Image: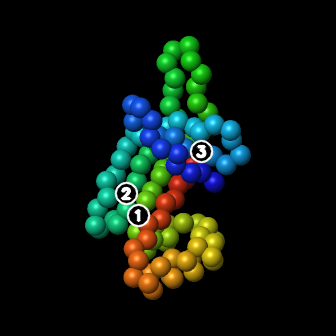
């Protein structure tokens, strides 16, 4: 599991991977902006490479996606969205609330 920790100086993204002490640093290499047709936006992020002589970040390229639950949920692996999360999304929709989902894939 991963959580977005924030943006650092210079536009680097900080992503905290579960079980790791420090966040990984990524640089967004491609952004597909939100569109009403796709109902989501996507970012391809690669591990940040330190300056010469510095330490390189380990890790895979990430595809991070955020958008409407109706647009993101069908893209998930079967069973990836737990039943409890699905019930909460339905509960929020019934109450007239808008929801947003985040998903990522490593390569």
The residue under the point 41% across, 77% down is: 97
Q: Nearer the viewer, mark 3 or mark 2?
A: 3
- On the image, the x and y values in percent for residue 83 come to 63, 77
- On the image, the x and y values in percent for residue 69 come to 45, 71
Graded by Cα atoms within 10 Å as few (under 14), some (14 to 19) or many (20 or more), the crowding at tag 1 reads: many
Tell me the distance, in whole angstroms, between the alpha carbons under discs 3 and 2: 21 Å
The numbered dot on residue 16 is: 3
Residue placed under numbered mark 2 in the picture: 41
Q: Is residue 86 left or right of residue 28?
A: right
Tell me the distance, in whole angstroms, between the alpha carbons under discs 1 and 3: 21 Å
The residue under the point 40% across, 39% down is: 29
Q: Nearer the viewer, residue 89 or 71?
A: 89
Tell me the distance, in whole angstroms, between the alpha carbons under discs 1 and 2: 6 Å
Dots 1, 2 in contact, CB < 8 A: yes
Q: Considering only order in the chain, which callout, 2 or 3, is on the residue closer to the N terminus?
A: 3
Q: Is residue 2 left or right of residue 101?
A: right
The residue under the point 44% across, 66% down is: 100
């Amino acid at each position: 599991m991963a959580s977005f920790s924030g943006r650092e100086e210079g536009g680097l993204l900080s992503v905290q991977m579960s079980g790791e002490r420090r966040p990984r640093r990524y640089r967004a290499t491609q952004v597909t902006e939100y569109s009403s047709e796709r109902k989501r936006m996507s970012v391809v992020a690669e591990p940040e490479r330190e300056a010469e002589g510095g330490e390189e970040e380990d890790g895979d390229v990430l595809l991070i996606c955020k958008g409407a639950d109706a647009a993101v949920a069908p893209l998930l692996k079967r069973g990836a969205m737990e039943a409890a999360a699905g019930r909460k999304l339905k509960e929020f929709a019934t109450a007239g609330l808008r929801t947003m989902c985040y998903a990522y894939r490593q390569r």
